[in-house]
């Protein structure tokens, strides 16, 4: 190795001789030339030295059979001279490699060794945790600066929430618009002090997902090269370590702002304190963040990320209790959307195959139709007292195919969602008992926001209802218990079960929640939540039935009490308005417990219309009169009405109409608008009553034929048509081993003539004439009203 000091060599001839001697020597392979850049003469000769060494290198290393020779130029220079000297760029010509060693940075700045270790070597996070902690102490120092930078760019435009919605005062103060940036930083510091592990997890995420990635390491190496080159060229006024320090600070500060943005969205600081470090909840939940979007955003960003405004997002009008709830919910929703798309494609394929099969079966259907036409008049020999035989297989399939198909789709969706969540490595790690509880709680809170606008109770009372509905959602029915017990992960099964319930039964869930709030509002002194859940091994269906039964009972009691005391019914009207908006589904009201209460439920629907009708004089007195005339006493329905099936209140229709008509006559008022409301009530009651009995239909037909029926002729025709539809359904159920078909022929409908004659008492039809239009019917023909309605029905369906 030869080392020439240019301070000794004063002219170019001597330098040429020394270099030529090195070139001809077979023992020496490395030539080092040391130049003192602080001496002007030596600095000016750098281009000459570079040119001489290039020629020598070309001469020595042109043939591969000779040993290679290497050349090193070691330049000493102060940092101040690097900024304006023009001779140094010459060393970057052609193919020279260079290294820049900065030894002028004060000891208080970043240590060069740690900086190079952090930026250029991939540290094993798991196996070298101690080394990582030692090298990252500087990032902990930068963390406070990151908080200031984040707060200075944060823009809060969210609505101001009530104080009682926050349990953490620092979180509440942070989200107030009038809070200063300095105070917001103090609030963040206080929260991070409570969560002493969260800062460490954020720093670890930075190294695992950003700084220690292969692409990032390559960029960091290139950055060191470019910074050293720019420093030597005079483009940077700072040393290499200071430049790297500044670049790393920008990267880390941007990353911390990126993470904090997800944390503070949707008032997330309030839920942070619920995390536990025992189960490593911090690192699990932080994996929900897509860190690749941070790198991509930095690459595509034209505006420096440090200058961008960060706008706080509030996707919900409440405070979720699950940290990073929006990301957690979106991840599950993406899985659910994929499943729904697959199920929809499968259903479309099934429909296409079914359609193809149906088109090829036209001769069979035509033959079946011919057999049906030859059937005798069924109602000529109709025995109203005979029990209905069990439906045929075809009919049973038609009656329940829609329900079974819906249940099968629901079960398929739940099972596939369980599998998808299990296969998701991030979700499967996150889901625990606490996360399941808070996530279900948040779903109910979001759904119930619109309902809570109808109440003015404190937040505490609302939370009780949310907790109850959450517990109810986590219950299962008997037919689901086997699937739950056989599941690999109970928490994942329950989460998929909850999501499926909200996806397919959202209306029932809203109805259940409103029932809770209404029952509370009607009797706030008696809490019922613990009693409904007290039974061991109870099920969803049982709790739901008991709740709705309790609600309707309280509603009935609160109806009878104002009628007795002549109190204001405003509260009752508000409660029933909410019920009508979120009315229970048929699968709830068709249970045995509600069949016995159906007369009360339908009567309350009528009462609601009476109370809303502004033309009704003293409606409370009218309701009290209806209760007395129909024998619907406050403690229940008497024995005569208790065992009525189906729409039992319609069997009281004659009494109801007569009472209303008499009441309006006594008060010299016009009942036209109320009668229109009653007509709509009758139609609505008929449409929702799928289990109407034959005797009930006969009773209504007889009522239409009475002279005391004060309904208009068009309304009578509408009611008659609806009753005929129900009779058709009853006749279909009584046919044995005959495929179900719709009555579309006038010949089939004429069979109802015998039913009409049964409803007309002590009247002869010898002189009856069919009218050509319903408008010419007069009161003289009132006793034959059913015959007129039947023939006009036949003409309309001909």
Image (cartoon, rainbow, N blue to C red):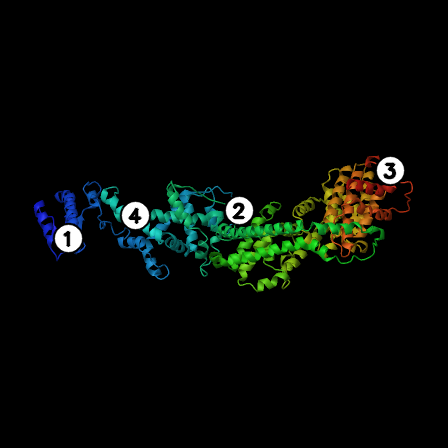
Q: What is the CA distance from the residue labelled 3 to the residue labelled 2? A: 62 Å
Q: What is the CA distance from the residue labelled 2 to the residue labelled 4? A: 43 Å
At horizontal 27% and vertical 51% (from top left) the residue drawn is 108
Q: What is the CA distance from the residue labelled 3 to the residue labelled 4? A: 101 Å
| 633, 604: nearer the viewer | 604
Please determine whether, in this image, residue 65 is positioned above or below residue 609: below
Q: Earlier in the sequence, mark 3 or mark 4?
A: 4
Identify the element where label 3 is drawn.
helix
Residues at circles 1 and 2 in contact by the CB criterion of under 8 Å: no
Task: Please say whether residue 738 is visible from this viewpoint.
Answer: yes
Q: What is the CA distance from the residue labelled 3 to the residue labelled 1? A: 129 Å
Residue 480 lies left or right of residue 707; in this view the side is left
Q: Nearer the viewer, mark 2 or mark 4?
A: 4
In the picture of the structure, the residue carrying the numbered disc 2 is 316
Residue 174 lies left or right of residue 25; in this view the side is right
For residue 549, which quarter of the picture?
bottom right
């Amino acid at each position: 190795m030869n080392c020439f000091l240019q301070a000794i060599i004063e002219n170019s001839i001597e330098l040429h001789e020394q270099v030529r001697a090195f070139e001809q020597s077979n023992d020496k392979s490395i030539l080092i030339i040391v130049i003192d850049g602080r001496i002007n003469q030596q600095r000016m000769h750098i281009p000459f030295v570079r040119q001489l060494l290039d020629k020598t290198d070309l001469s020595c290393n042109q043939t591969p059979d000779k040993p290679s020779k290497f050349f090193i130029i070691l330049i000493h220079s102060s940092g101040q001279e690097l900024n304006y000297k023009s001779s140094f760029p010459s060393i970057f010509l052609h193919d020279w490699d260079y290294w820049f060693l900065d030894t002028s940075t004060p000891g208080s700045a970043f240590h060069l060794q740690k900086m190079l270790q952090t930026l250029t070597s991939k540290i094993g996070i798991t196996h070298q945790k101690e080394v990582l902690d030692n090298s990252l102490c500087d990032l902990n120092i930068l963390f406070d600066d990151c908080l200031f930078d984040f707060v200075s760019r944060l823009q809060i435009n969210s609505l101001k929430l009530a104080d009682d919605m926050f349990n953490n005062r620092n979180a509440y103060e942070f989200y107030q618009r009038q809070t200063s940036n300095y105070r917001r930083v103090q609030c963040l510091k206080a929260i991070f002090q409570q969560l002493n592990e969260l800062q460490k997890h954020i720093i670890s995420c930075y190294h695992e997902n950003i700084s220690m990635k292969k692409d990032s390491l390559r960029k960091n190496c290139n950055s060191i090269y470019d910074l050293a080159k720019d420093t030597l060229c005079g483009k940077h006024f700072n040393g290499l370590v200071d430049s790297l320090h500044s670049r790393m600070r920008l990267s880390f500060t941007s990353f911390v702002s990126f993470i904090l943005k997800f944390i503070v969205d949707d008032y997330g600081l309030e839920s942070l304190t619920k995390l536990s470090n025992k189960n490593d909840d911090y690192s699990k939940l932080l994996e929900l963040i897509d860190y690749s979007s941070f790198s991509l955003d930095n690459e595509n960003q034209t505006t420096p990320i440090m200058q961008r405004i960060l706008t706080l997002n509030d996707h919900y009008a409440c405070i979720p209790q699950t940290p990073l709830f929006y990301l957690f919910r979106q991840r599950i929703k993406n899985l659910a959307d994929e499943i729904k798309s697959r199920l929809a494609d499968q259903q479309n394929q099934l429909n296409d195959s079914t359609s193809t099969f149906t088109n090829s079966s036209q001769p069979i259907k035509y033959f079946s139709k011919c057999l049906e036409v030859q059937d005798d008049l069924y109602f000529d020999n109709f025995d109203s007292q005979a029990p209905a035989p069990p439906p045929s297989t075809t009919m049973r399939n038609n009656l329940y195919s829609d329900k079974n198909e819906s249940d099968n789709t629901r079960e398929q969706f739940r099972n596939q969602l369980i599998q998808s969540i299990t296969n998701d490595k991030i979700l499967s790690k996150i889901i625990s008992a606490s996360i399941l509880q808070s996530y279900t709680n948040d779903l109910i809170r979001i759904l119930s926001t619109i309902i809570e606008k109808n109440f003015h109770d404190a937040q505490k009372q609302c939370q009780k209802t949310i907790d109850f509905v959450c517990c109810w959602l986590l219950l299962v029915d008997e037919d689901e218990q086997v699937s739950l017990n056989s599941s690999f992960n109970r928490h994942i099964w329950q989460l998929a079960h909850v999501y499926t319930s909200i996806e397919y039964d959202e209306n029932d869930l809203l109805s259940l929640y409103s029932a809770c709030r209404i029952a509370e509002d009607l009797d706030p002194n008696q809490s019922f939540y613990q009693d409904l859940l007290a039974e061991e091994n109870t099920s969803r269906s049982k709790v739901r039935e008991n709740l709705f039964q309790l609600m309707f009972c309280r509603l009935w009691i609160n109806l009878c009490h104002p009628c007795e005391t002549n109190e204001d019914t405003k509260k009752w009207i508000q409660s029933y308005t909410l019920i009508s908006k979120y009315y229970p589904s048929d699968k709830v009201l068709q249970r045995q417990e509600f069949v016995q209460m159906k007369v009360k439920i339908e009567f309350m629907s009528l009462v609601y219309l009476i109370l809303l009708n502004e033309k009704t004089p003293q409606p409370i007195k009218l309701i009290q009169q209806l209760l007395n005339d129909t024998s619907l006493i406050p403690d229940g329905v008497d024995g005569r009405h208790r065992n009525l099936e189906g729409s039992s209140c319609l069997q009281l229709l004659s009494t109801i109409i007569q009472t209303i008509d008499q009441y309006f006559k006594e008060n010299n008022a016009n009942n036209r608008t109320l009668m229109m409301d009653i007509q709509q009530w009758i139609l609505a009651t008929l449409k929702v009553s799928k289990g109407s009995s034959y005797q009930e239909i006969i009773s209504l037909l007889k009522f239409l034929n009475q002279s005391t029926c004060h309904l208009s002729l068009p309304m009578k025709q509408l009611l008659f048509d609806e009753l005929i539809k129900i009779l058709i359904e009853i006749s279909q159920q009584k046919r044995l081993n005959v495929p179900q078909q719709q009555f579309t022929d006038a010949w089939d409908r004429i069979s109802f003539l015998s039913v009409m004659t049964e409803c007309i008492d002590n009247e002869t039809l010898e002189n009856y004439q069919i009218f050509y239009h319903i408008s010419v019917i007069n009161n003289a023909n009132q006793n034959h009203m059913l015959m007129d309605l039947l023939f006009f029905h036949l003409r309309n369906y001909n």
